[in-house]
Amino acid sequence: MFKPLDRNGIAARIAQDIPEGWFVNLGIGIPTTVSDFVPTEREVIFHAENGVIGIGPAPAPGSENPYLVNAGVQHITLRTGGAYVHHADSFAIARGGHLDLCVLGAFEVSETGDIANWARAADEPVKQVGGAMDLAVGAQRLWVAMEHNTKGRGESRIRRVCSYPLTAKGVVKRVYTDLAVLDVTPTGFVVRDMVPGLTFDALQERTEAKLLPAG
Amino acid sequence: MFKPLDRNGIAARIAQDIPEGWFVNLGIGIPTTVSDFVPTEREVIFHAENGVIGIGPAPAPGSENPYLVNAGVQHITLRTGGAYVHHADSFAIARGGHLDLCVLGAFEVSETGDIANWARAADEPVKQVGGAMDLAVGAQRLWVAMEHNTKGRGESRIRRVCSYPLTAKGVVKRVYTDLAVLDVTPTGFVVRDMVPGLTFDALQERTEAKLLPAG
Amino acid sequence: MIDKFVSTRAEALAGIENGATVLLAGFGAGTPEHLVAGLIAQGAKDLTLVCNAGGRDDGPIADLLATERVRKLVCSFVRPASVAARLFTAGKLELEIVPQGTLAERIRAGGAGVQGFYTPTAADTLLAEGRETRVIGGRLCLLEYPIVGDVALIDAWQADRWGNLTHRDSARNFNPIMAMAAKLAIVQTAHVVKLGDIPPEHVHTAGVFVQRVLHVPV
Amino acid sequence: MIDKFVSTRAEALAGIENGATVLLAGFGAGTPEHLVAGLIAQGAKDLTLVCNAGGRDDGPIADLLATERVRKLVCSFVRPASVAARLFTAGKLELEIVPQGTLAERIRAGGAGVQGFYTPTAADTLLAEGRETRVIGGRLCLLEYPIVGDVALIDAWQADRWGNLTHRDSARNFNPIMAMAAKLAIVQTAHVVKLGDIPPEHVHTAGVFVQRVLHVPV
């Protein structure tokens, strides 16, 4: 038997893999919480699209600074050594290849590294693009954090081809789910890690795309 | 009889026409000295391409700040209310239409407002473009300060068509020479002002382009 | 003496015409709310509004949209539960959705005189359908055009009489670039300071980009 | 602990390869002269040098060019009386002359991930001959491509261990944008400060753009 990771578990698993010195943008949802699991003494510098460099721990209740929010409009703090820039400079960071890593949530990821995370249908009346397309094409590495399967029907989010409208093509390097860590390689998804108790075959059963064993 | 203006005279004449509140870039040569003739109490804000906003009077000898130069790499001062920006932001000012006025020197100006101020021949081995092309197309108004005729052969710099390589086409609004002030209009050069004692006919004689009287 | 301060909100917003393109800064912080209220009072209609997001059910953007004087909204996302989404669904609002970085870059381009640019962002997505693309250095890129505002509504922490501004913390966001990109940048500032009180190396938005400043104490 | 400081000039310049594109900041002030001397000592050749101007008969740029290890110079002007002009005339140096604002914008584009842009600057001049133009909004524009450096040599007034920088007065010039546009930005700083000594709203070049910092006291 195995136990899927909860959302914090996924975030903590991602945090393990971020080395000191990286410059990282965390998307809304699971990714936002990744920074909670990076110890402060390991200096990782977190960026927010709205021009914040060096996000610190969440403020203590009652001590929020109304002038300081992240890209999800949550109150944050700035750590010593941080800086503010305007929106165009902030996206120059994201689009100019200056992020070592961006972690985004997604609906689906394909075996060629396509990501779909902004719309569930091409004809959705209103669109929620935000900065995801900029981050997806601009970062040196894109990792995705999401549940392996959809909540209701248990469909695989790890796919040969994405069924939802794309955010960007061929950009995802790694996917962290509640079940496994998958690398996107030229030959497809390679299973890098699984939750304890899960077998390769059981994971493949829950996955639409073909999986390859590591090594 | 008439007396041509000297270089300071041209600069002083230009200074008369710059109203308070304008944001102005002054090119190298005669234009640089225009600011000397604008009284400090008339607040005109001078910009330099290297990111200086609000150039003040020249520093007293011995009190130069080595970190503060203008686009001609002369030591300058900054007036109260000035600011520094980087080179791309500085040219965003120039190219984005934020200068009320730019004053450049030139070899020639044509009756359609073309300016030639960077090369005397298309095949000159080395080129001295600098920021003139950016300023010429970007400023709200381009005025030119130059001698009316060439020094040696006395040829007219005020021309039907420029003979030198262009800096930009159709951008000059007014020319200040040692003899006259000429507006560039849809019908050609209109004489707005002349030095005392000079007649329209005597000016036309020294000018290759056809001149039109004001009014 | 240059003095960009105006005394009243009506004076600050005077002259905005029907059909104007209005750039509205702010991202969680740094929204010039008093000026938005002033724009509603001023009454201009048939507006194109450019801002990061389409707002919620309340707040300054929702209030402005609810007047139905905005013809078109240009932004990076619209929440399904919002005044913007309901107006769009009812056919009362045009929407142009722009990736947030492209939006910021288009606004900067408007301020910097860049007439168009190529970006890989969104080039292989639905947002590129029917639009001009070009492969540069092996990457598919989308051609984007600058955004220029007739008016920008700007928030500042400090302002002097030349219009030099500082912005506090992350309230900076779109404020400097929207001021650059508009013919008429109108500022609400929390603090008025003397000329020279903002050191020249610490000016965030230079006065050259600012036309009017209204003191709105916090 | 992130610490971008290096102890020696040789360490600062280590690893620059033959054929590298080197962005060199400075405009009358703000030239990292000690690093240029270090580049000469380091010995990389076949370089492409990008800087505002081609220098004179002496000074850091002339010294570097005189080594004849620069294959191509990209700049906005070259004085007739200069090492650069003589090398060019002798066929020992390629020249690409770029209007100064276009040069700054191309460098910023390199740092910002913009893959190309249209500008009216130089569109109707000799510099546009044989190149791609396009009419946008009734204006003839020239297509320009970004400049990306393998290395940037940067001057700073203050630096902390994360590589956050300030630049003094007009010594700022090309420094922030060249740091952005290079894979390896090497800084000489007049002053070393503790992390946090530069207030977050007063950082001129953020550490994200900086890889190595050498203390060169003035």
Image (cartoon, coloured by chain):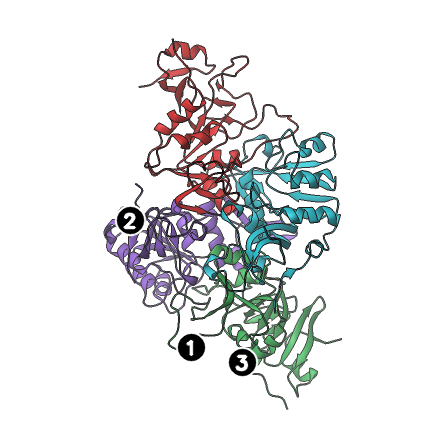
Chain colours: A green, B red, C purple, D cyan
Nearer mark to the viewer, of 3 and 2: 2
Q: CA distance from mark 1 to mark 3?
A: 20 Å
* Image quarter hosting the C terminus of chain A: bottom right
Which residue is identified by label 3? A8
* Disc 3: CA contacts within 10 A as few (<14), some (14-19) or many (>=20): some
In the image, residue D86 sits, relative to residue B196, either above or below, namely below
- Which mark, by number, is residue C180? none
Q: Nearer the viewer, residue A186 or D96?
A: D96
Q: Determine whether, in the image, residue D138 is placed left or right of residue C47.
A: right
Q: Secondary structure at mark 3?
A: helix
Judging by the rendered image, the residue that carries numbered circle 1 is: A60
Residue C12 % position (x, y): 27, 50
Question: At numbered mark 2, what does the secondary structure look like: helix, strand or loop?
Answer: strand
Left/right of residue B19 with respect to residue D63 in the rendered view = left
Indicate whether C67 appears above or below B120.
below
Under tag 1, what secondary structure? loop
**What percent of the width, then of the height, locates residue B180?**
40, 18
Real-space Cα separation, disc 1 to disc 2, in angstroms: 38 Å
Badge 1: residue crowd in 10 Å (few <14, some 14–19, many ≥20): few
Report how many numbered discs are placed on residues in the image: 3
Amino acid found under the numbered disc labelled 3: Asn
Q: Which quadrant of the figure contains the N terminus of chain A?
A: bottom right
Of D161 and A54, nearer the camera is: D161
In the displayed orientation, state which residue is furthest to the front.
B62
Q: Residue furthest bottom?
A: A1
Q: Chain of mark 2?
A: C
Sequence-wise, which precedes: disc 1 or disc 3?
Answer: 3
C195 and A135: which is toward the camera: C195
Q: Where does the image place residue B159, in percent across and percent down from the top left?
A: 48, 18
Which residue position is annotated with label 2? C5
Amino acid type at circle 2 is: Phe
